[in-house]
Image (cartoon, coloured by chain):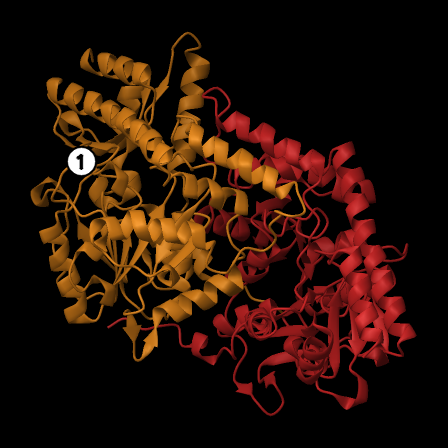
Chain colours: A red, B orange
Amino acid sequence: MFKINQNYLKLQGSYLFSTIGKKVRTYKEENPDKNVISLGIGDVTLPLAPSIISALHRATDEMAAKETFKGYSPDLGYEFLRSAIAKHDYEARGVQIAIDEIFISDGAKSDSGNIGDIFAEDNKIAVCDPVYPVYVDTNVMAGRTGEFDSTTGKWSNVIYMPCSKDNNFVPMLPKETPDIIYLCFPNNPTGSAITKNELQKWVDYANEKGAVIIYDAAYEAYISEDDCPHTIYECDGAKKCAIELRSFSKNAGFTGTRLGFTVVPKELISDGVPLNNLWARRHGTKFNGAPYIIQAAGAAVYSPEGIAQTREQIDYYMNNARVIRDGLLEAGYQVSGGVNAPYIWLQTPNGMTSWEFFDHLLQNASVVGTPGSGFGPSGEGYFRLTAFGTYENTLEALRRIKNL
Amino acid sequence: MFKINQNYLKLQGSYLFSTIGKKVRTYKEENPDKNVISLGIGDVTLPLAPSIISALHRATDEMAAKETFKGYSPDLGYEFLRSAIAKHDYEARGVQIAIDEIFISDGAKSDSGNIGDIFAEDNKIAVCDPVYPVYVDTNVMAGRTGEFDSTTGKWSNVIYMPCSKDNNFVPMLPKETPDIIYLCFPNNPTGSAITKNELQKWVDYANEKGAVIIYDAAYEAYISEDDCPHTIYECDGAKKCAIELRSFSKNAGFTGTRLGFTVVPKELISDGVPLNNLWARRHGTKFNGAPYIIQAAGAAVYSPEGIAQTREQIDYYMNNARVIRDGLLEAGYQVSGGVNAPYIWLQTPNGMTSWEFFDHLLQNASVVGTPGSGFGPSGEGYFRLTAFGTYENTLEALRRIKNL
């Protein structure tokens, strides 16, 4: 008699964004005349840049001719893409990453879930609170989190590192020592950034304790301040303790095009075993590469035109972020984020819970955001708005919010 | 101190295709004048069909315009694709599969590895021997296989179901009861097919024992005989015990384009828990959809032009299969497969081992195939040739083999 993975039964509710989706659908059905503006899910809205479109067409034509057709991709991904990444994302920042330390994938969500496979079940994880739900949920599935306490909203075997306005939404080193530390900067959902000096403390801590850092840098392209590192490998010793996750979703609009990569440095070793080897084995066994066409499009992101065009898109979104931030401040909200990240994190007014404010905003302004409590207990009383709408919609949403 | 997944250290070196690569490189260096023909790796060679290319261009153009740009895909995949699958792959064969029983993915390799996530560690698996290595390797990673015995080439906690000419390469029901049964028909590597009557016995057995069947039907498009089922759901009761994996790699040339799907029927229930829910949760949490462009290309496979054009490609490959099969029979080999599958499985002559025959073929005919022993202990003494080469190369390879 086969047995299911009982850990799945511990998973709480349904995935945050599906719940939001259902509420919005219901509202739209009941209010067909209302123009609902979503500043909710972190999904981009600008079309792919012209240089990326050209690369997709070119690569498609290659797939149409026998001489240039591409079958299975190399295990780690095409070298043309890994070389471009090594050069532009690392060498240009004074960091040497070898091309066989880079693993092309179908996106950072898959990688952030799958990376857990190479670790034993009995590792204790530490997460920021609030946090991107995938880190915790995938560890629930893997049996690492203990039991859920519905009173506190916490898992018994997870170290929560609260991020609030008291610590400027950057966690303090935990009292209890974790084995695996998830960090995401610029942060989803709070929009906060970390300085190089602060991140160096985490790297030193991880190296001292023998912990590994899973560093999600999916939003690095949004950094506007000089003292914020774009990669954790700007910190000394990070290659000995950190895995970095990167994405093409937010810097180049690939949310529906799917491309990402993970860096596992060869210096990251456990008991003589390089984690690079383990991830290479997982990658080669449970994955068969991102589509050639998409990898070709990814390389176009690093062309001179691609760099200029995607920069323009990021500037467009960051202008929205400014509109949201300034508008909320004007309306008297407590606001953070929006400077080095496309996320604005606001405190709900009048002691409303996050979900109460969600309903309030949807019902009275037809604006969709994301309840902070969906990201963890310390997110209660907070709310996330994203800069990924159109400029016009963002303006209109803020007009409505100011009139609430 | 973080701990790695020790199961990874048990994995046996996956040297099969790298060893082949090395031997071929050495041979080419020593024989620069020889034209080496590979009928080895199961990768397609024909370019994508014109209707698929058109769909890729069309979808790319959609990604270029704000009005038609696509961000995150629906969790299960686009409905246009799932509807086409439900209609053409199932309804057309008298099988009703709901569109929320179909999960679009980046390919059957990922799915065949990832599906293990929803099962407990203490399930005993049964595999055919020889077998596609991914089934076993991913279960090694999950800790289900026990210890490897290098003398027998077997894992202590795996039920091996030998497939040889004695049973026409279709396994007999195992003596020991398994929890999870991996079946792949038409089969890689042996090229054998299973009749509906024979498969019904497996379905009945699984339902009787409370086992689940992971049914890999990646090669169903190659079936030419009427009594072979294209989907396991043609068998009565299969929805209560079987998960089906499907691929666009071999029927439409998507090895480098990456698309597949998995069917998890709602009737498949363990202790009141539908496995459909578990897979939906995994799919929504650890995956973010196949690219829109690729899903659009997948839908084109089901258009009238797509059906005709991909049929032509399959016919081309199956003509190669016929050339290989007839040529080998003429040359006095014992041959199976090649009728309902693009793989031809031959017995090595004169008691040669699989690797001895590999060297013999490479040295004396400049032809590359795959040693059967690379697929499991019962593959020893066998050899795989694939029909995915060009017609001209296939003819020439067989001419050389006949002259050996």
> On the image, which quarter does residue A18 sit in?
bottom right
B167 over A138 or under it: above or below: above
Q: Give x and y (percent) for residue A117.
A: 50, 61
The N terminus of chain A lies in quadrant:
bottom left
Secondary structure of residue under mark 1: loop
- Looking at the image, the residue that sits furthest to the bottom is A151
Left or right: B89, with A31 as reference point:
left
Chain that bears disc 1: B
Callout count? 1
| Residue B87 seen in this snapshot | yes
Q: Residue at image x 73%, y 58%?
A: A388
A83 over B87 or under it: above or below: above
Pick the front one: B156 or A70? A70
**Mark 1 surroundings within 10 Å by alpha-carbon count, few (fewer than 14), some (14 through 19), many (20 or more):** some
Left or right: B261, with A332 as reference point:
left
Pick the front one: B232 or A264? B232
| Residue A169 seen in this snapshot | no
The residue singled out by tag 1 in the image is: B224
Amino acid type, label 1:
Ser
Q: Residue at image x 42%, y 37%?
A: B254
> On the image, which quarter does residue A390 sit in?
bottom right
- Looking at the image, the residue that sits furthest to the top is B33
Q: Give x and y (percent) for residue B350.
A: 14, 25
A161 over A221 or under it: above or below: below
> On the image, which quarter does residue A23 sit in?
bottom right
The C terminus of chain A lies in quadrant:
bottom right
Q: Residue at image x 34%, y 23%?
A: B389
Q: Give x and y (percent) for residue B42.
A: 35, 34
Q: Give x and y (percent) for residue A389.
A: 73, 58
Pick the front one: B25 or A114? A114
- Looking at the image, the residue that sits furthest to the front is A33
Pick the front one: B373 or B206? B206
